[in-house]
Image (tube, rainbow, N blue to C red):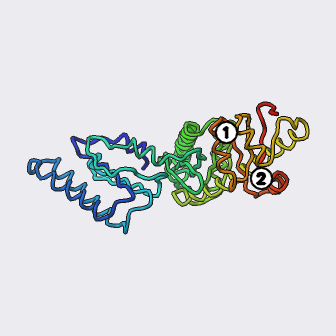
Amino acid sequence: MNISDIREYEGRGNELVSLYVSPNNSISNVQNILDQGLNSIEEYDEGTRMKYSVRDTLFRMKEEISDFNNIPENGIIIFAGRVNGDTMCHILSDELQSAVEETKYVTGSQFSTETAEELVAITNPQLIVVLDTKRMIIGHSKDGKVSVIDEFESGVPSKHSKGGQSQSRFERRREEHKKEFFNDCKQRIKKNISEDGSVFIGGPEITVKEFLNKTGIDKSVDVVTITTEYVNRVGLRRVSEVADDHRKEEEKRNRDEKIDDFMRMVKENPSLTEYGVDRVRRAVSYGAVNELIVHENKFENIMQEAESKGASCVRINGQTDKEKRFIQAFNGIGAVLNYQID
């Protein structure tokens, strides 16, 4: 279940409860909020569907919240209520990328998901996927943080071995279902991928290869495949780890390329470069810096001023040989200028 699904759920009256809990709260205080909710429904007419529905929901929420020893660092969000005849309860805590600012209790015929969608969003994420013939899960990943954005079952029937014409017909129908499922997977991936982005797809090796061959998605999208037998949240986290390693290596290559460009400018057009703290600080004060390459542990004030005046900053940390040589040769700071200064 993901927020896009929860957003579409509908109940009757005030059956659906959205509870946002900020990290500076306590479990006992949350239980008190739910107790107040229970007290408020006593004004409902006895025997009404609404009264029993909300009562069941709040008791379910009290039960779920009791499993927490304390409030997680970014808080908790709970969506609970009667949907399609059943009482559902969905909790967000690990998925939150930033903290819940305000504790609030909201009831209605729909869940209050707008704030939750903002809190689970990851800035500049990578798209990660796990799939087999039974299901697919799509998520976003960055720096070890994973957010599920889509999840669905395939409906592809399992294999059987009766033999004969019945077996042949069954296999044909199964292949048709699989083709539809794979095409659906392709469209959902393309819907969520950013422009010029890449996608990391995990799953059983044979299934992932079949998916790529039948959909041809790797012809239009940069795809990295990872073999994993776990097509669940565990498998998605495994794919996330590979995606993060891939991103870090890509960032290293990009930083090295920026250093190469700077070194080329120093040789070919030195009047449009500056290096050393005092000269770069001066260029920044004039607003003349186009791009600043700087050791991330130094010169924070210079970086902030440069960015405020429209310069882009490349932060290095000495992880590569080129970064180490740059730090040693230019005291960890250099700039490419928009125009020559005296």
Q: What residue type is labelled 2?
A: Gly
Up/down of 78 relative to 265, above or below: below
Q: Specify which label sits upstream in the sequence, 2 or 1.
A: 1
| Residue identifier under label 1 | 221
**Farthest top residue in view:** 339
Where's residue 303, x and y in %?
67, 46
In this picture, residue 279 sits left or right of residue 50 = right
Let me know if residue 246 appears in the view. no
Up/down of 196 relative to 209, above or below: above
Q: Nearer the viewer, residue 188 or 322?
A: 322
Secondary element type, mark 2: loop
At x 87%, y 38%, the residue is: 270
In this picture, residue 274 sits left or right of residue 305 = right
Where's residue 126, x and y in %?
61, 47
Where's residue 88, x and y in %?
32, 53
Up/down of 177 relative to 297, above or below: above
Q: Nearer the viewer, residue 92 or 306?
A: 306
At x 46%, y 58%, the residue is: 94
Q: In which quarter of the image is the C terminus?
A: top right
Q: Residue 332 carries which label?
A: 2
At x 59%, y 44%, the residue is: 124
Q: Which mark is residue 140?
A: none
Q: Residues within 10 Å of mark 1 (few under 14, many from 20)?
A: some
**Given this view, does label 2 or label 1 mark the residue nearer the observer?**
2
Secondary element type, mark 1: loop
Quarter holding residue 22: bottom left
